[in-house]
Amino acid sequence: MSSTSKITFYGGIHEIGGNKFLVEDKGTRLFLDFGNQMGKEKQYFSEYMKPRTFNELGDMFEFGLLPKLDGLYRRDYSQHMGFDGKEDTAFNAVLLTHAHVDHAAYIHYLRPDIPIYCTQASKLIMQALQETSAGGDEYIMFKENFQLHRDKKTGELVRTRDVLKTPRQITVFEPTKRFMIDSIEVEPLPVDHSIPGVSGFILHTSKGSIAYTADIRFHGRRKADSEKFVEKCAQANPDILLCEGTRVHETFSSTEYEVENDAKTVIDRTEKLVVCSYPTRDLDRLLSFYNAAKEAGRELVIDMKQAYLLKLFQTSELWRNIYPKPDDKHIRVYIPRKKWGMLGRDPAIWNEDLLKGDYYSWEREFLDYNNRTDYRYVSAHQKELVFSCNDFQLKELIDVRPEQGSQYIRSTTEPFDDEMELSEERVINWLVHFGLIQKKKQLTRSHVSGHGDGTQIKHVVENTNAKQLIPIHTEKERFHKKWHSNVKTVRLNKSLELR
Ligand SMILES: [Zn+2]
């Protein structure tokens, strides 16, 4: 066991996202986040060009998308590809700031016995991600792959997949309660961002303290948390601050409350259906549309994924009074027609079981909700509804048929690369086709980012009293250098020793 204390940067430096920082102190080894380097992964892989299942880790190592470390990865994958897998687990924990993919997605590859420490909200979001997505990233439940078992009847060896299910060790920490991971004391501190339950950290090691902003902003519903984070850091005098900088080059941010107001304004002037698109897991944004719809005497129509998430959040003492229940009287849960399209057919011929067969098992409970709805109701009650319709649900417009006098609000991030530009062009074609806009220029946008602008990050840098600063989650480190006299530039896969 090495006695040097250090941080090694396996992603999340000189790039936006992909945070994977290994902190080592007195033999304790923990990762701060274990995210997907989206930009870098896209250089080699795509939806149609994925790593090969039988050599998945190897295909990722090939391009440096995962660090090649022993005792870190799931044994079924590593043994199958001959990357050992028999050695002991060599890591104590992953401390997760939040459940966005660029911080959490590669948890899928980790051994299930490495504990993941996160907030309750992050756990619930990961649960929703795993249970409601077809891809099945194994955030909270782990299924052994590449196993054989002997068939009871024939006695033959057959492939086993998805039979052995093990829950991962997910340890939920309280928002501000300190805890120990071996020799390191962890002080979690909530911050404001575009998903619920985000936590920054101050790590107290034997060689000083390391503060980590996570993804942070000061223009959402939880601005006071971010202020408190800065205050607590100032008191701790951190030796090192890992500070994000996604939007350091910008100088202005409107607020989440302004998004809510924009939604109110559009709803007020709309005679027919209000259609909107916003990120599924940004529940603070959902709340903006919920509040705006409620105030106008309309109901918000949400999809089953959002309903599922709201259902899970009702299990949390901390969150159940912040977000509405999925069967709230101002909410309707939209059931789309799927597969054979049984919904709306004569139940005498097409019975209940056939209808259920159109849906995944996690979706079926919503068929029994009193506030369920479908295209027939939405189409017939356009004046009374705000219809949440993300880009994958635009097909519903074929059934819903917005009438003249309907409006659309786009509450998502603006495209920042060619791929996004192309897919937004497609969205616009749909909106024009259904008369929601006449041309691109008429698109109503109202969105705020999950990240602080330069003014906000400068505030963090100047008021946390950190002795040394390391810019992370950014491509523009020169801004941090303007605001702090001791900025350390680190390199990918290299370590910084703590003294
Ligand atoms: Zn994030």
Image: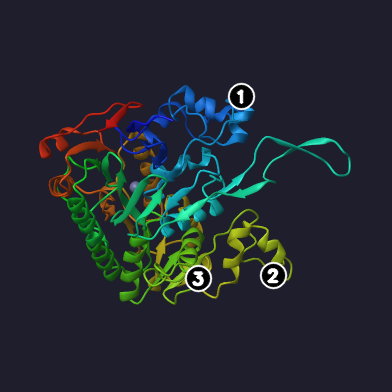
Mark 1 or 2: in front is: 1
If the image is split into quadrants, where does the N terminus sit? top left
Percent x, y of residue 367 = 59, 68
N-term mark: 1 or 2 = 1
Task: Residue at 44% x, 23% y: name it.
Answer: 63
If the image is split into quadrants, where does the C terminus sit? top left
Residue annotated with mark 2: 347
User: From this viewpoint, is residue 167 visible?
Assistant: yes
Task: Residue at 72% x, 67% y: name it.
Answer: 351
Q: Residues within 10 Å of mark 3 (few under 14, many from 20)?
A: few
Q: Are marks 2 and 3 in contact (CB under 8 Å)?
A: no
Percent x, y of residue 31 = 40, 40
Amino acid type of disc 3?
Tyr
Marks 3 and 1 sit apart, C-alpha to C-alpha, by 56 Å
In this rendering, the answer to whether 430 lies above or below 30 is below
Percent x, y of residue 268 = 27, 71
Residue annotated with mark 3: 377
Task: Residue at 88% x, 44% y: name it.
Answer: 153
Mark 3 or 1: in front is: 1
Q: Residues within 10 Å of mark 2 (few under 14, many from 20)?
A: few
Percent x, y of residue 382 = 41, 69
Amino acid type of disc 1?
Gly
> Which of the pair 315/340 is nearer the observer?
315
Marks 1 and 2 sit apart, C-alpha to C-alpha, by 54 Å
N-term mark: 2 or 3 = 2
Q: Are marks 1 and 2 in contact (CB under 8 Å)?
A: no
Q: Element at badge 1? A: loop
Q: Quadrant of residue 347?
A: bottom right
Q: Element at badge 2? A: loop
Determine if the C-beta at disc 2 is less than 8 A from ligand 1.
no
Residue annotated with mark 1: 82
